[in-house]
Image: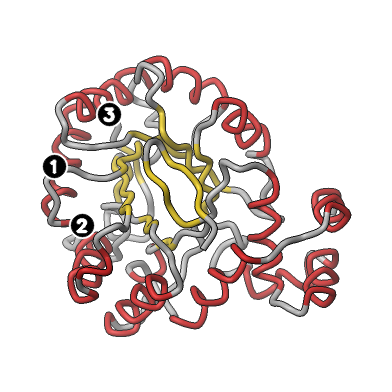
Amino acid sequence: MQQRTIGNRQVSAIGLGGMPMSIEGRPDEARSVAAVHAALDAGVTLIDTADAYHRDANEVGHNETLIARALKEYGPGAAGVLVATKGGHLRPGDGSWTQNGRPEYLKEAAKASAKRLGVEAIGLYQFHRPDPAVPYADSVGAIRDLLDEGVIELAGISNASVAQIDEANEILGGRLASVQNQFSPRFRSSEGELEHCAKLGVAFLPWSPLGGIRSAPELGSRHAAFNEVAEEAGVSVYQVVLAWQLALAPVVVPIPGASRPESIRDSAGAADLQLTGDQVARLSAA
């Protein structure tokens, strides 16, 4: 599969997002493990998770534990996979999402994530979402400390503005490896952040790149241009969306969520889909 760069690591151009495996509506764990294995078989070497990817209040880190189990069961072939996790978001168990960006919390959360993942150092750790009750510099400062202490190998941020990207990169001493923001045909407000990451050479990881679990089935009907290109290329509209994102900048690494083997196999095929300049222009203007 086509490769892209996050920090000092080479990863597959298409990653796997683990959230659907652990939140509301999640499938049985056997199917999720099969989806992870299908991703690895397809050449995926980036898996995105978070300690907040769980359903009930008493199961923090459900997805991290599940991903760790799937990789262990896969065997030696999973050795080169970069597992990216996040901290700073919480799920009280009532379906809501809250924030905790206190430095002391983030440091303990990272260490707990490392334990669940079964690693001495987390490959990529990302501050999940800014906490309005905590200065952004303080939260990112904790990520810097984790990096300096060797608890994490690469540092990233999520749900960040252009200004926050610059602030984080300065606090991290130019070591910001990734920015994970929502971006899809339906949600393009992070286009400025994507372009800024391209200028900086920082990886941009679109989350919900297909528009989210509920909206993904309607991609073709809501966005006619993507459906037209899919028919021209003889592939799914999902592959076209991901291939379009890859064509926007060499720093883009989409992380479509999946809990079915067939879904991630199809998404992985986007890495080999070459769109024409005209097709990319049509999709960008759609």
- Mark 1 crowdedness (10 Å alpha carbons): few <14, some 14-19, many ≥20: some
**Rendered position, 153 above or below 217:** above
| Residue at numbered disc 1 | 111
Distance CA(mark 2)–CA(mark 1): 13 Å
Decide if residue 24 is on the left or right side of residue 285: left
- Mark closest to the chain's N terminus, 3 or 2: 2
Find numbered disc 2 in the image and state the secondary structure of the residue it sits on. loop
The picture places residue 1, in percent across and down from the top left corner, at 51, 63
Q: Is residue 133 left or right of residue 1?
A: left
Give the image location of residue 146, x and y in percent.
Answer: 20, 29
Mark 2 touching mark 1, by CB under 8 A? no
Quadrant where the C terminus is found in the figure: bottom right
Give the residue at x 38% y 55%. 48
Residue at image position (66%, 33%) is 195
Mark identifier at residue 183? none
Give the residue pinned by disc 2: 60
* Residue holding disc 3: 143
Q: Nearer the viewer, residue 272 or 185?
A: 272
> Foreground: 271 or 94?
271
Q: Earlier in the sequence, mark 2 or mark 1?
A: 2
Q: Could you tell me which residue is drawn at 44 percent across and 37 percent down?
A: 178
The mark closer to the camera, 3 or 2, is 3
Q: Which corner quadrant of the image does residue 212 belong to? A: bottom right
- Residue 17 location in percent, x, y? 43, 61
88 to the left or right of 242: left
- Relative to 183, is 253 on the left or the right? left
Q: Name the kind of residue labelled 2 in the image.
A: Val
Q: Secondary structure at mark 1?
A: helix
The amino acid at mark 3 is Ile
